[in-house]
Image (tube, rainbow, N blue to C red):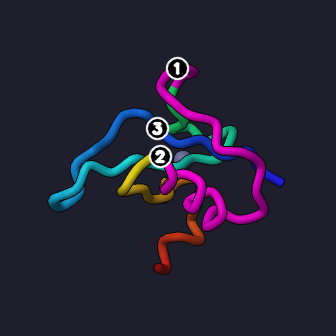
């Protein structure tokens, strides 16, 4: 199981303000206070579901979720 966090901050992607999801230990993980703990999951898609409850547009970080690059 891995701990997942979502950024409070956003970055522009197309017409959207996207919140990025990170795994614990990611080099891009925001400092405490700029992130929201999502929970422990076996896959980032479950973390995405939880993040979607708070934010309309979320995506996984490509550095810590390389498996998401293929989507
Ligand atoms: Zn990351």
Q: Under 8 Å from ligand 1: the CB of mark 1?
A: no
- Magenta-tinted stretch: 31-53
Q: Nearer the viewer, mark 1 or mark 2?
A: 2
CA distance separating discs 1 and 3:
9 Å
Q: From this view, report whether residue 43 is shown above or below residue 54.
A: below
The residue pinned by badge 1 equals 33
Residue 64 image label: none
Answer left or right for 42 relative to 53: right
At horizontal 36% and vertical 34% (from top left) the residue drawn is: 9
The residue pinned by badge 3 equals 7
CA distance separating discs 1 and 2:
16 Å
**Residue 46's spot in the image, x, y percent?**
66, 64
**Residue 24's spot in the image, x, y percent?**
68, 40
CA distance separating discs 2 and 3:
11 Å
At horizontal 53% and vertical 23% (from top left) the residue drawn is: 31
The residue pinned by badge 2 equals 54
Answer left or right for 39 relative to 64: right
Secondary structure of the residue carrying numbered label 3: strand
Secondary structure of the residue carrying numbered label 2: helix
Q: Nearer the viewer, mark 2 or mark 3?
A: 2
**Residue 29's spot in the image, x, y percent?**
54, 36
At horizontal 48% and vertical 72% (from top left) the residue drawn is: 69
Foreground: 67 or 47? 47
């Amino acid at each position: 199981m891995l701990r997942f966090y979502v950024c409070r901050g956003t970055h522009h992607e197309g017409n959207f303000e996207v919140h990025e999801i990170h795994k614990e230990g990611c080099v891009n993980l925001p400092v405490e206070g700029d992130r929201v703990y999502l929970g422990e999951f076996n896959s980032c898609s479950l973390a995405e579901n939880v993040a979607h409850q708070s934010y309309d547009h979320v995506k996984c970080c490509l550095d810590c979720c390389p498996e998401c690059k293929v989507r």
